[in-house]
Amino acid sequence: MLVLEGAGAKFDRVIDLDSLRRNPGGISLDGGTLTLEGIARDFSLIAQEVDLKRAEVKMRLEVRTPKDTVGNVVVNSAEFWVGVYDFPMIDNTRLDHDQRCAVVLNALEESSADITLAYFPGSYASLKEKPYYQEVVQNLMKTNAAYNLDLSRK
């Protein structure tokens, strides 16, 4: 997590498991807006279930990017179980612009769970993940633009 925090952004939340047990539909956690490489995204988390025997919490994640290049709001969503043995560099959600986010379960007790949402560049994801063709082209275009800008200064 220290590596991802240094390269990206994060926020922490605490889930009240007693409240979750009373609300079978799940409970919404306070959302957060994080910015990385000039891209601001709104993150929403909903805790849906808890399994203390397996030390896991079922989460729903919604990521809203206010505007893409055409001015549309882009929404990504995912449902997953997160446990204390999941690694954010491997178990993460792919976002556009070669970025990722992951929910990490830091601690789980009888009455509460401590989680962190990490938002980080895709280059910090596991090596098994291959970038999409569009991401490769975008990265090449960025590199080319930066190279041309550097040459124009000379």
Image (cartoon, rainbow, N blue to C red):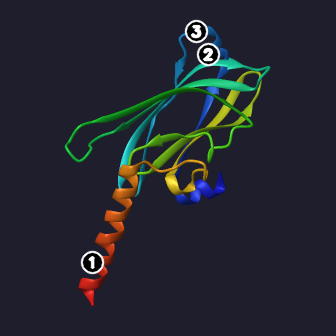
Type of amino acid under label 2:
Leu
Q: Position of residue 70 (x, y in %)?
A: 19, 44
- The crowd level at tag 2 (other Cα within 10 Å; few <14, some 14-19, many 20+) is many
Q: Are marks 2 and 3 in contact (CB under 8 Å)?
A: no
Q: Distance of mark 1 from mark 3, alpha carbons?
A: 55 Å
Q: Which quadrant would the C terminus be assigned to in this image?
A: bottom left
- Residue at image coords 40%, 33%: 76
- The crowd level at tag 3 (other Cα within 10 Å; few <14, some 14-19, many 20+) is few
Q: Distance of mark 1 from mark 2, alpha carbons?
A: 53 Å
Q: Which residue is mark 1?
A: 149
Q: Quadrant of residue 18?
A: top right
Identify the residue at the far left of this view. Answer: 70
- Residue at image coords 40%, 56%: 136
Q: Position of residue 130 (x, y in %)?
A: 52, 50
- Residue at image coords 62%, 9%: 22
Q: Which residue is mark 3?
A: 24
Q: Which residue is mark 2?
A: 20
Question: Is 80 drawn above or below residue 26 in the view shown?
Answer: below
Q: Nearer the viewer, residue 128 or 48?
A: 128
Mark 1 vs 3, N-terminal side: 3
Question: Is 115 drawn above or below residue 112 in the view shown?
Answer: below
Q: Nearer the viewer, residue 9 or 149?
A: 149
The disc at residue 34 is: none
Indicate left or right for 10 with 152 as reference.
Answer: right
- Residue at image coords 55%, 16%: 26
Q: Distance of mark 2 from mark 3, alpha carbons?
A: 7 Å
Identify the residue at the far right of this view. Answer: 53
